Image (cartoon, rainbow, N blue to C red):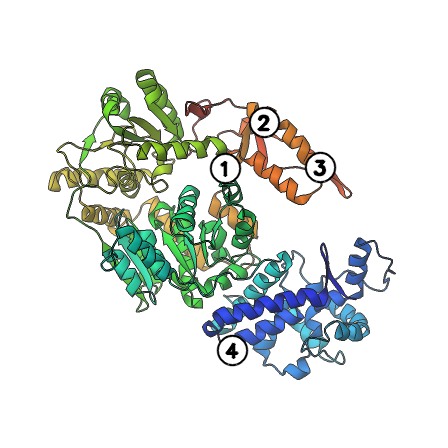
């Protein structure tokens, strides 16, 4: 009996059959999207990908791990099974051309990415020595499969030569060979990972989001005709096109995206996790679609905490991209432009999917460059994309145009409604601190939102205002532990929904595009126009302005985060454009003016020579010349997530969690260890590693195993800083710190 896995025990034939079942489902769902030769190469790759596990040394290792009596083969050495599997291909029967042969051999040989460069001479030596002896055993193991095997080793040197040759890369091969290789290797990765995890490869493949969304809109509007808004109608009518849509807040972008998605497998991305959680809840609960997924760095905790009985199934399916619709962050799905080892899995998945990029202007120039490069690659391999945003920097549109993405396969449109006014601004030359009394007076009768650029400024303003208003003041920023931040976010939503509530919420820009709230007045520091207009969207979000006073107050003096959070040159141009608007159009800001002002701010004319523009152009150039396999998976993910933050537990909270850490040290059941880690992570917070570098200590807890002693949760640190939060009063400042030259959101 030839074994493939030891935990759980699975034979080689059983594991291969699991892949074939998933291959059949994948072919049924997407067979018409790829050429027949892609599917045939993938079928062969699936059947032969693990045949190298018949290698006597591999069987010895796995059976020894199961405490079975087995004799060690002294004449053999360890060779990773993936390098041996191609030698079981019956090349004399397959009669492939050289390009197809190379694609198949390399897809199989590298379906596990390893740091070690294969030594083709040693691999060939072991193949000649052992494979002829294993042919009868492997024929017997795969007797129920329609498979042939080589009768001798005459083709072995040719197979070994493909391991010696340069790997198929985007910069080294013509487009067809490269894209075929990506599809075969990438989909093999997906099939193998799903089969090993015993997770479905695809779920609900025939479902149509267009039907679901139309039904939802009919119920929402209580109409049988005319229930779609113009944006939604446009998306519905252009399902077979890529879309670039600019639309003001409140036009139903989420429904428009789902109408466009139709029957396509869909990845829906937004910049912030809290936005993803809200979208997931809306589609799963309000719209009643049970098979959507959620995938981000804390999605397991959110799903668990939400009380969903099937949260583990949802999480596992999301992790393996099985769901028809997955709400996710870009670091989970769009990191393939870095071409890390194994990137083909992600790239190939997007070949039969569509991706929705919501609020592209919210990303940094570097990350936006990655997104644009990803869209270019998706376009080349046959996937679909939709970019929808409230404001679109002109330089991003220019980049899409230059890369051929705004072609005949792409439809563009701008949607705005100037029929009624939502925002009237007042520019203040002084600091926000000078308006404490005015804010306090408004808070007695109104819902007032204050947005500042840094946490330090938010905490300082909270302390000042609390002396005046006491329990009418609330604070929200990212330096609260997960458990408390979730409570704060829910409290903010409850405050917004309560028609009788009055008071002040002080926040950072984490609410710009993450929480659907509608306050009466906004007081904000100056920030770049795209950020500023996102802040506008938290005030008079969906209602016309019904009085003659300004409801948006912008403070120009000494805005925090200038030069750290925000580019100084962008800030200066934003201030200039605001004054020009006041002088030319007055204080009323119509939706069309917001769109044109952001386009002007990020035009080449205004940005040429600035650091912002140079960073964006440099990032695109680096991505265009990125060598395959230069970075690892974790390095690529770290670049997109940002490597400036670290997960911490404040000291006084950690002291209360010691029993949980001790339980984690002793627990041997994998599922229970995961539960303990999730429970502990509710008390963590991500902070700037630079800001707190002198206050960090590793967690001194270890798990003893047969093979050694390992730290538990070595990615979490103890933070020697005070922490303040009072859940009963929804009050507190979060993690407290001394003054620092570093800033964070």
Considering only order in the chain, which callout, 2 or 3, is on the residue closer to the N terminus? 2
Looking at the picture, tell me which residue is in the foreground, 503 or 406: 503
Q: CA distance from mark 3 to mark 4?
A: 50 Å
Residue 397 x %, y %: 30, 56
Q: Which residue is mark 4?
A: 36
Is 4 left or right of 390, judged from the image as shown? right
Foreground tag (1 vs 2): 2
Label 2 element class:
helix
Q: CA distance from mark 3 to mark 2?
A: 18 Å
Q: Which residue is mark 2?
A: 654
Label 1 element class:
strand
| Residue at horizontal 37 percent and vertical 63 percent from the top | 262
Asked if the residue under mark 1 is in contact with the one under mark 4, i.e. CB atoms within 8 Å, the reply is no
Asked if the residue under mark 2 is in contact with the one under mark 3, i.e. CB atoms within 8 Å, the reply is no
Indicate whether 656 appears above or below 485: above
Looking at the picture, tell me which residue is in the foreground, 440 or 737: 440
């Amino acid at each position: 009996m030839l074994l493939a896995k030891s935990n759980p025990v699975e034979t080689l034939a059983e594991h291969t059959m699991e892949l074939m079942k998933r291959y059949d489902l994948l072919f049924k769902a997407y067979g018409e999207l790829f050429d027949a030769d892609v599917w045939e190469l993938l079928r062969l790759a699936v059947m032969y990908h693990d045949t190298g596990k018949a290698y006597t040394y591999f069987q010895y290792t796995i059976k020894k791990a199961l405490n079975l009596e087995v004799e060690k083969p002294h004449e053999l050495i360890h060779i990773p099974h993936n390098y041996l599997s191609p030698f079981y291909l019956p090349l004399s029967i397959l009669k492939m051309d050289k390009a197809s042969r190379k694609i198949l051999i390399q897809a199989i040989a590298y379906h596990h990415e390893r740091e070690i460069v294969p030594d083709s001479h040693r691999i060939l030596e072991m193949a000649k020595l052992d494979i002829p002896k294993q042919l009868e055993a492997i024929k017997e193991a795969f007797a129920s499969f329609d498979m042939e095997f080589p009768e001798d080793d005459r083709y072995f040197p040719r197979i070994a030569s493909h391991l010696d040759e340069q790997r198929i890369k985007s910069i080294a091969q013509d487009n067809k060979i490269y894209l075929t290789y990506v599809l075969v290797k990438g989909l093999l990765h997906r099939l193998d990972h799903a089969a090993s995890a015993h997770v479905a490869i695809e779920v609900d493949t025939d479902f149509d989001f267009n039907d679901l969304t139309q039904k939802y809109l009919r119920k929402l509007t209580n109409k049988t005709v005319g229930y779609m808004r113009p944006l939604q109608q446009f998306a519905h009518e252009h399902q077979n096109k890529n879309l670039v849509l600019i639309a003001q807040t409140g036009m139903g972008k989420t429904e428009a995206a789902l109408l466009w998605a139709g029957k396509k497998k869909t990845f829906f991305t937004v910049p912030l996790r809290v936005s993803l959680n809200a979208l997931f809840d809306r589609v799963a609960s309000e719209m009643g679609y049970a098979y959507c997924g959620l995938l981000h760095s804390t999605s397991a905790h959110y799903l668990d905490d939400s009380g969903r009985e099937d949260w583990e199934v949802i999480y596992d399916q999301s992790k393996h991209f099985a769901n028809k619709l997955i709400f996710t962050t870009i670091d989970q799905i769009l990191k393939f432009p870095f071409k890390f080892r194994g990137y083909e899995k992600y790239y190939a998945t997007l070949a039969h999917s569509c991706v929705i990029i919501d609020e592209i202007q919210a990303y940094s120039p570097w990350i936006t460059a990655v997104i644009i490069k990803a869209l270019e690659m998706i376009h080349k391999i046959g996937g679909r994309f939709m970019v929808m945003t409230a404001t679109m920097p002109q330089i991003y549109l220019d980049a899409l145009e230059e890369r051929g993405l705004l072609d005949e396969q792409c439809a563009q449109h701008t949607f705005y409604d100037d029929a009624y006014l939502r925002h009237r601004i007042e520019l203040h030359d002084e600091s926000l601190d000078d308006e404490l009394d005015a804010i306090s007076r408004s808070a007695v009768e109104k819902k007032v939102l204050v947005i500042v650029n840094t946490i330090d400024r938010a905490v300082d303003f909270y302390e000042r205002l609390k002396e005046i208003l006491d329990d009418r003041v609330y604070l929200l920023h990212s330096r609260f532990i997960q458990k408390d931040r979730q409570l704060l976010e829910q409290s903010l939503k409850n405050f917004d929904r309560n028609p009788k509530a009055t008071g002040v919420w002080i926040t950072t820009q984490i609410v710009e595009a993450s929480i659907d709230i509608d306050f009466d007045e906004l007081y904000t520091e100056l920030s770049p126009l795209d950020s500023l207009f996102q802040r506008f969207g938290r005030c008079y979000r969906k209602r016309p302005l019904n009085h003659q006073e300004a409801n948006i107050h912008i403070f120009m003096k000494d805005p925090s985060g200038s030069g750290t959070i925000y580019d100084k040159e962008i800030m200066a141009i934003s201030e200039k454009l605001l004054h020009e608007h006041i002088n030319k159009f007055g204080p009323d800001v119509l939706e069309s003016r917001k769109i044109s002002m952001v386009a002007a701010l990020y035009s080449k004319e205004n940005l040429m020579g600035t650091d912002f523009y140079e960073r964006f152009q440099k990032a695109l150039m680096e991505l265009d010349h990125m060598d395959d396999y230069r970075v690892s998976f974790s390095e690529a993910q770290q670049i997109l997530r940002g490597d400036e933050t670290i997960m911490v537990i404040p000291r006084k909270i950690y002291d209360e969690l010691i029993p949980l850490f001790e339980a984690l040290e002793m627990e041997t059941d994998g599922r229970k260890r995961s539960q303990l880690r999730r429970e502990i992570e509710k008390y963590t917070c991500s902070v700037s590693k630079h800001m707190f570098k002198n206050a960090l200590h590793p967690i001194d807890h270890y798990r003893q195993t047969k093979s050694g002693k390992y730290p538990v949760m070595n990615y979490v640190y103890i933070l020697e800083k005070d922490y303040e939060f009072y859940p009963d009063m929804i009050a507190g400042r979060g993690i407290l710190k001394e003054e620092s030259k570093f800033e964070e959101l």
